[in-house]
Protein backbone atom coordinates (compact mmCIF):
# COMPACT_ATOMS: atom_id res chain seq x y z
CA UNK A 1 0.00 0.00 0.00
CA UNK A 2 1.28 3.45 -0.90
CA UNK A 3 1.89 6.21 1.65
CA UNK A 4 -1.17 8.09 2.88
CA UNK A 5 -0.84 11.86 2.40
CA UNK A 6 -3.18 13.51 4.93
CA UNK A 7 -4.90 16.78 4.11
CA UNK A 8 -7.52 18.84 6.03
CA UNK A 9 -10.27 17.46 3.73
CA UNK A 10 -9.18 13.77 3.90
CA UNK A 11 -6.22 12.05 2.25
CA UNK A 12 -4.76 10.75 -0.99
CA UNK A 13 -2.50 7.90 -2.03
CA UNK A 14 -0.33 7.87 -5.15
CA UNK A 15 -1.04 4.63 -7.04
CA UNK A 16 1.22 5.28 -10.04
CA UNK A 17 3.88 7.92 -10.69
CA UNK A 18 5.54 7.76 -14.11
CA UNK A 19 7.10 10.31 -16.47
CA UNK A 20 3.90 10.49 -18.57
CA UNK A 21 1.18 10.28 -15.87
CA UNK A 22 0.31 10.14 -12.16
CA UNK A 23 -2.65 8.29 -10.60
CA UNK A 24 -4.04 9.11 -7.15
CA UNK A 25 -6.78 7.63 -4.97
CA UNK A 26 -8.43 10.63 -3.28
CA UNK A 27 -10.70 10.19 -0.25
CA UNK A 28 -12.71 13.26 0.79
CA UNK A 29 -14.38 13.12 4.21
CA UNK A 30 -18.04 14.16 4.60
CA UNK A 31 -18.21 17.96 4.32
CA UNK A 32 -14.64 18.11 2.98
CA UNK A 33 -13.76 20.49 0.18
CA UNK A 34 -10.55 20.76 -1.82
CA UNK A 35 -9.09 24.16 -2.69
CA UNK A 36 -10.40 26.05 -5.69
CA UNK A 37 -7.27 25.60 -7.79
CA UNK A 38 -5.73 25.28 -11.22
CA UNK A 39 -2.68 23.64 -12.76
CA UNK A 40 -0.51 25.14 -15.48
CA UNK A 41 1.24 21.94 -16.53
CA UNK A 42 -1.31 19.12 -16.29
CA UNK A 43 -4.89 18.08 -16.91
CA UNK A 44 -6.87 15.70 -14.70
CA UNK A 45 -9.58 13.06 -15.08
CA UNK A 46 -11.68 12.25 -11.99
CA UNK A 47 -13.53 8.93 -11.81
CA UNK A 48 -15.88 8.51 -8.83
CA UNK A 49 -15.68 5.14 -7.07
CA UNK A 50 -17.89 5.74 -3.99
CA UNK A 51 -19.89 8.48 -2.30
CA UNK A 52 -21.39 11.59 -3.83
CA UNK A 53 -19.85 14.95 -4.51
CA UNK A 54 -19.71 17.99 -6.70
CA UNK A 55 -16.95 18.85 -9.14
CA UNK A 56 -16.82 22.56 -9.93
CA UNK A 57 -14.94 23.19 -13.19
CA UNK A 58 -14.62 26.77 -14.46
CA UNK A 59 -17.66 27.74 -12.34
CA UNK A 60 -19.93 24.91 -13.53
CA UNK A 61 -21.16 22.28 -11.05
CA UNK A 62 -21.27 18.62 -12.00
CA UNK A 63 -22.53 15.91 -9.64
CA UNK A 64 -20.22 12.93 -9.17
CA UNK A 65 -21.48 9.52 -8.08
CA UNK A 66 -19.94 6.05 -8.30
CA UNK A 67 -19.31 5.32 -11.98
CA UNK A 68 -19.34 8.91 -13.22
CA UNK A 69 -16.36 10.96 -14.36
CA UNK A 70 -15.26 14.48 -15.31
CA UNK A 71 -12.31 15.93 -17.20
CA UNK A 72 -10.44 18.99 -15.95
CA UNK A 73 -8.52 20.69 -18.77
CA UNK A 74 -5.08 22.15 -18.12
CA UNK A 75 -5.52 25.68 -16.70
CA UNK A 76 -9.19 25.23 -15.69
CA UNK A 77 -10.23 26.33 -12.22
CA UNK A 78 -11.62 23.38 -10.29
CA UNK A 79 -12.61 22.04 -6.90
CA UNK A 80 -14.04 18.84 -5.45
CA UNK A 81 -16.56 18.80 -2.59
CA UNK A 82 -18.12 15.90 -0.67
CA UNK A 83 -21.85 16.55 -0.21
CA UNK A 84 -22.72 13.15 1.29
CA UNK A 85 -22.46 11.55 4.71
CA UNK A 86 -20.01 8.92 3.43
CA UNK A 87 -16.47 9.16 2.07
CA UNK A 88 -16.19 10.40 -1.51
CA UNK A 89 -13.59 8.26 -3.29
CA UNK A 90 -12.09 9.47 -6.56
CA UNK A 91 -9.44 8.00 -8.84
CA UNK A 92 -7.54 10.91 -10.37
CA UNK A 93 -5.46 10.45 -13.52
CA UNK A 94 -3.06 13.29 -14.30
CA UNK A 95 -1.50 13.79 -17.73
CA UNK A 96 0.76 16.56 -18.96
CA UNK A 97 4.30 17.83 -18.58
CA UNK A 98 4.68 17.92 -14.76
CA UNK A 99 2.89 16.36 -11.77
CA UNK A 100 4.47 17.99 -8.69
CA UNK A 101 2.36 19.39 -5.85
CA UNK A 102 3.95 22.80 -6.52
CA UNK A 103 1.89 23.03 -9.74
CA UNK A 104 -1.17 23.75 -7.56
CA UNK A 105 -2.24 27.39 -7.69
CA UNK A 106 -4.78 27.78 -4.86
CA UNK A 107 -7.35 30.51 -5.49
CA UNK A 108 -9.62 29.86 -2.49
CA UNK A 109 -9.37 27.45 0.46
CA UNK A 110 -11.59 26.95 3.51
CA UNK A 111 -8.58 25.66 5.47
CA UNK A 112 -6.49 28.85 5.08
CA UNK A 113 -3.90 27.44 2.63
CA UNK A 114 -4.11 30.21 -0.05
Image (cartoon, rainbow, N blue to C red):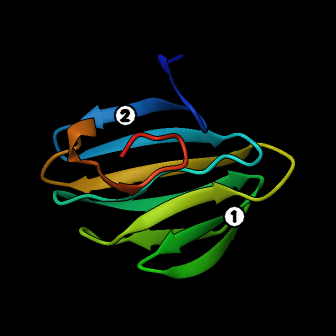
Seen from the viewer's position, the closer of residues 52 and 108 is 108
User: Is 45 on the left or on the right of 89, as rendered?
Assistant: left
In x, y percent, where is residue 40?
17, 60
**Badge 1, how many Cα within 10 Å: few under 14, some, many 20+?**
few
The residue positioned 21% from the left and 47% from the top of the image is 103
Which residue is labeled 1 in the image?
67
Viewer-proximal residue among 11 and 108 = 108
x, y percentage for residue 38? 31, 61
Image point (40%, 52%), residue name:
93
Q: Earlier in the sequence, mark 2 or mark 1?
A: 2
Q: Which residue ends up furthest to the left in the rendered image?
A: 97
Q: Which mark is drawn over residue 16?
A: 2
Q: Is residue 67 above or below residue 59?
A: above
Q: Visible in this render: residue 54?
A: yes
Please identify the quadrant where the N terminus is shown.
top right
Q: Residue at x 57, y 33 (%)?
A: 8
Q: Is residue 48 left or right of residue 17?
A: right
- Kindly indicate the quadrant of the structure image that contains residue 71: bottom left
CB under 8 Å between discs 2 and 1: no
Residue furthest out toward the bottom: 60
CA gap, disc 2 to disc 1? 21 Å
Q: Is residue 100 visible?
A: no
Work out whether residue 107 or residue 70 is closer to the camera in this orientation and state it.
107
Q: Residues within 10 Å of mark 2 (few under 14, many from 20)?
A: few
Q: Which mark is residue 100?
A: none
Amino acid sequence: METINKRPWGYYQVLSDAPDHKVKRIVVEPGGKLSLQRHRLRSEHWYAVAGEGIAIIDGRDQTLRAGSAVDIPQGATHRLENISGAHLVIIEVQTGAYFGEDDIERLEDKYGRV
